Image: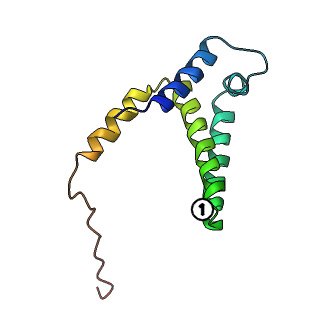
């Protein structure tokens, strides 16, 4: 699996980490550190949920893009290469019939 747009965005984020640029939002996130990055990931995830509940796909699309951006910043901050994510997604796509079995609880005992 590979996506040129995703890879290009990840490369820009990686470059911002290595070569900070004044006024860059990405550099600001790296400067503030993990807690700030995690806060933004959480905020964006919440905004995705709200947009989905509102049924506004244009808003949902924008919020998903914001979340993906912040997840890429998080991955770069944690030294998790996008290639590792692609590999894991590829491995998961090869699984067939991996529905999890529901746990049956006997409420009578």
Q: How far across and down, in percent of the image, does residue 70 sit?
A: 61, 37
* Quadrant of residue 99 within the rendered picture: bottom left
Q: Quadrant of the C terminus?
A: bottom left
Residue reaching furthest to the bottom? 108
Q: How far across and down, in percent of the image, does residue 19 sit?
A: 64, 11
Q: How far across and down, in percent of the image, does residue 108 sit?
A: 30, 88
Residue reaching furthest to the left? 96
Look at 60% across and 12% down and name the residue there.
18
102 is higher (above) or lower (below) than 89: below
79 is higher (above) or lower (below) than 62: above
Q: Quadrant of the N terminus?
A: top left
- Please indicate whether residue 68 sits to the left or right of residue 107 in the image: right
Residue reaching furthest to the top? 19
Look at 66% across and 66% down and name the residue there.
54
Which type of secondary structure does the marked residue at label 1 adopt? helix
Instruction: Between residue 91 and residue 56, name the one nearer to us.
Output: 56
Q: Residues within 10 Å of mark 1 (few under 14, many from 20)?
A: some
* Quadrant of residue 35 within the rendered picture: top right
**What residue is pinned by disc 1?**
52
12 is higher (above) or lower (below) than 6: above
Look at 37% across and 29% down and name the residue there.
84
Instruction: Between residue 42 and residue 94, name the one nearer to us.
Output: 94
């Amino acid at each position: 699996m590979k996506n040129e747009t995703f890879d290009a965005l990840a490369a820009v984020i990686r470059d911002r980490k290595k070569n900070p640029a004044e006024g860059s939002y990405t550099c600001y996130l790296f400067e503030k550190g993990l807690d700030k990055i995690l806060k933004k990931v959480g905020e964006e995830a919440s905004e995705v949920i709200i947009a989905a509940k509102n049924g506004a796909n244009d808003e949902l699309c924008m919020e998903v893009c914001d979340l993906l951006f912040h997840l890429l910043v998080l991955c770069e901050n944690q030294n998790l290469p996008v290639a590792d994510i692609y590999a894991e997604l590829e491995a998961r796509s090869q699984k067939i019939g991996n529905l999890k079995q529901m746990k049956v609880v006997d409420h009578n005992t």
